[in-house]
Image: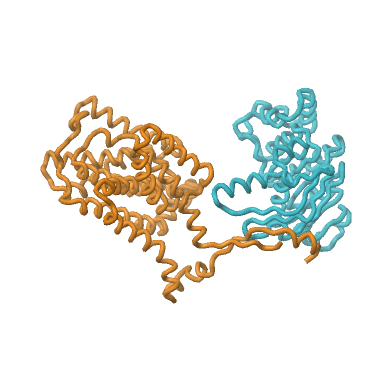
Amino acid sequence: MLEVKDLMVFYENAIAINNINLTCRQGGVTGIFGANSAGKSTLMYTISGIILDVKKKEEMKGGERITVLGRISFEGVDITHMKPSERAKKGIVLCPERRRIFPESSTLENLKIGGYLATKAQAKETMDYVFTIFPQLKNLKKREGGFLSGGEQQMLAIGRALMAQPKLLLLDEPLLGLSPLMEAMLARAIHEINLQTKITILISEQYARPILPIVHYGYVLENGGAVLEGTSRELMENPDVKSAYFGL
Amino acid sequence: MPNEQLTSRERRRERLDRGIKVRTEGLYALSSWKEMFYLLAPRIVLILGLLVAPFLLDMYWQRVLCAAGIYALLALSFDFLAAYVGLVCLGGSFFIGSGAYISGLLNAKMGWAPFLTIPIATVVGAIVSTLVLLPCLRLRGIYFAITSFMFPLLTVNVIIALNIFGGTEGISALATYPNPWVDQYLILSVVIVSLFTLRRLVNEDMGLILRSIKDNDQAVKASGISILSYKIKAVFIASLIGCFGGAYLSHLYGWVGISQFSLDFSILPIAATVMGGMGTLVGPVIGALILTPLSEALRGFGQLRVVLYCLILIGFIVYKPEGLMNYLQRKYHQFEHWEDV
């Protein structure tokens, strides 16, 4: 479904992503694991196209020069140079790191903003669906986004991304800064979303333990390169992964 | 490298610091004449250029140079406040006006000579400006900009309504400078001195605190530093520079009036800062030295002058928002080449 080939991203002279090849299977959950500075977020930005926007802004103010090389294709179409808004229309929707919900809009408004690309019927249906997988949000419909707790904000962010009718959902560190209980709950929710809606999910995470069981195929990044890849089981049994990500 | 065929086609533009730049960072710069020259050349060009300029110009353009110097001072103080303290001050004309009125009054009412009135007006004007801005210092961003923008308008109307300080007529027949050379070298030397003083200041500890106030004032508070007192100091320094411009202006024209509170003194320095590059300090000075003569040269176009002027500004904001100076600095320090990936 999504195919990334020989992707390289430079921030000025520093290499952020080094020759990454990655595929997302239709209907699967693909995981990207790595420590800080491994290049997870850059990879997400590159796939969703946000990096082109950042690149333009940096060029305008004469800051860092960002170079993107390689090819990204989605459903057989080359999207390497496509604008982020076009990619969202094609169904690549990013749920950004640290949530980035609209703090001054209420929960309901946040979801409606997310549903800009959906038809009325789709939006209504998806909104009902969001409230069934995240029942906690039901009581907070009128609450401003900025006053939600971290976990509730993350649910809202995922819900907002779902409202855009994604075919490929990019989740950038969805468990960042959450309690273990909340982590488990969200991991379960993500698993359910994948099972029930058949949306392909690409998920990046530092802390692999709660995510690894729901992932079908995973990649481990280190300093911008993919050092390891395999199915969930292969990764779990790999001694390096065990010591690095499970602390065993 | 894997995938030889594919990678050999792909290239990227690499930007590297010149070796001499790397070598001249720190004390090592003093190790050879070439490296000292590399560091000093741009500064010498600026200083010599400013000092030689009066000899190359005729009477009319010498006057323009003096005006450009005043705008340069204002642009310098605007840039210092906006880029290093985070206070976008649109009240540049308040600095000019208060400096001008104080020195004008001292000269007209007390009969003091310019060499006395200018320093007094600079310091007293700066104190007055700081006191006036003091209540707004807790504001940030656009709110500070709006309130500081109001003070010149307010003062003009107070002067007109109460008919004080000569009312709409202003105060005329002030002492002027003995000859045009004093005019020009006074303002040029002050521009150079304040430019290099500010540059030193922002790289000292105080500048570090000011910049961090701009970045995250809560973190500065948490470090046990009173941000209000630092903001006061910064505003005082900026208004010193501005008030000097005003005091100088009053003796340049031998006249003080409400037009010294006009919008020009607030807006043109901002334009100069945008053109020259925010946060470079030298950029705004160069911007003012370009824009002021430019607006004079375009005077022949009549009303179209403003249009051309606006077009130039829009062009800069859209195509080179980093400003002239940032661009030139980059070209001076770095070179680019294509590199195979």
Pinpoint residue B147: horizontal percent, then vertical percent: 38, 34
Q: Going by the picture, which residue comes out furthest to the front?
A: B300
For the residue pair B28 and A244, the one nearer the viewer reads as B28
Q: Residue at x 35, y 55 (%)?
A: B195
- B60 sits to left or right of B293: left
Q: From the viewer's perspective, is residue A221 above or below residue B24?
A: above
- A23 sits to left or right of B274: right
Instruction: Please tell me in which quadrant of the rendered image residue B98 appears.
Output: top left
The colour scheme applied to this rendered structure is by chain
Pinpoint residue B10: horizontal percent, then vertical percent: 72, 58
Which quarter of the image is occupied by the C terminus of chain B? bottom right
Chain B pictured colour = orange
- A114 sits to left or right of B99: right
Q: Going by the picture, which residue comes out furthest to the bottom?
A: B31
For the residue pair A211 and A39, the one nearer the viewer reads as A39
Q: From the viewer's perspective, is residue A20 above or below residue B72?
A: below
Chain A pictured colour = cyan
Instruction: Please tell me in which quadrant of the rendered image residue B31 appears.
Output: bottom left
Pinpoint residue A195: horizontal percent, then vertical percent: 87, 38
Q: Going by the picture, which residue comes out furthest to the left?
A: B111
For the residue pair B105 and A129, the one nearer the viewer reads as B105
Confirm whether residue A174 shows in the render: no
For the residue pair B183 and A194, the one nearer the viewer reads as B183
Confirm whether residue B97 shows in the render: yes
Pinpoint residue B178: horizontal percent, then vertical percent: 15, 50
- A239 sits to left or right of B212: right
Which quarter of the image is occupied by the N terminus of chain B? bottom right
Q: Residue at x 65, y 40 (%)?
A: A100
Q: Residue at x 71, y 60 (%)?
A: A223
